Amino acid sequence: MRRKPLTARTADRYELYERTVQDPDAECDLIEQVWDELKGRTPRSLREDFCGTAVTAIAWVRRRPRNRAIAIDLSPEVLAIAEERVRKRLRPAARRRIQLVRGDVLKIRTRPVDTIAASNFSYFTFKTRPLLRRYFRACHRALARGGMLLLDAYGGSDAWREIREPRKEKGFTYVWDQHHVNPVTAHVTNHIHFRFPDGSRLRQAFTYDWRLWTLPELRELLDEAGFRKVTVYWEGTDRKGEGNGVFSPTERGEACEGWIAYLAAEK
């Protein structure tokens, strides 16, 4: 039976976000790649900060029978959805290996883990050096000995422009809206909108009030927070010059319009 076309009234904004922004299996692949290249072993425990619907933590638990995950978010609404995802996507035995926690990542105390992941630029919500350093120090304390904090970051000349970038998806259009950029403070306001074939729209389905941090700033703050080594993983490009999803350690990036990188900070 054919599914009815999506509309603004019938669409689930969290499901749309998962389909357009997140790739939990690729995220887990990268975690294992980085650990193999930097540590020569496979991690078992993951803490997903700012977890949203916890799809990365769920994918991590599904990956290996010994994997465990903690997923943390402040929003009771989104954690309720994450709990539903856990029930639907994990078998009972696997559910016992994932913990959903409502809490502030600046204050929360959890059992030590191998990896903490803060993805989709979520930690950009901390807009001052003291506050972001405080978060990094909290992560350092929460990691097991030899653990690793994995962060993503974005930049490039287009990151400083007030632009909209639509992208066609199956059954709807995703729109990334860099609505406001203040180069004096590096504060940015970004929205995600969704458009549907019937002309209806989900305007500002998600809104982000961030500071656009640079890689040198992040590396300095991670160093100040006590991490002994920070490696930048830069995304490669395909023949068209677009990002290919393959990340490699480097000390030299490209001065391009848009880039995505990861930082692997070792305790």
Image: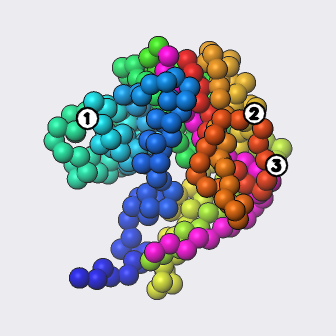
The magenta region covers 146-170
Q: Name the residue beneath numbered marker 1.
A: 65
Q: Quadrant of the N terminus?
A: bottom left
- Marks 1/3 in contact by CB < 8 Å: the verdict is no
Cα separation, mark 1 vs mark 2, equals 36 Å
- Residue 117 screen position, x and y as percent: 49, 35
Q: Specify the label residue 212 is tagged with.
A: none
Q: Secondary structure at mark 1?
A: loop
Which secondary structure lies at badge 3? loop
Evaluate whether residue 149 shows in this view: no
Amino acid residing under circle 3: Ala
Say the numbered circle drawn on residue 251.
Answer: 2
Look at label 1 and name its amino acid: Pro
Quadrant housing the C terminus: top right
Residue 17 in view of the camera? yes
Q: Is residue 87 above or below residue 150?
A: below
| Residue 100 figure quarter | top left
Give the amino acid at mark 2: Glu
Q: Residue, x 68% and y 17% (percent of image)?
A: 224
- Residue, far bottom: 198
Question: In what element is the residue under mark 2?
Answer: loop
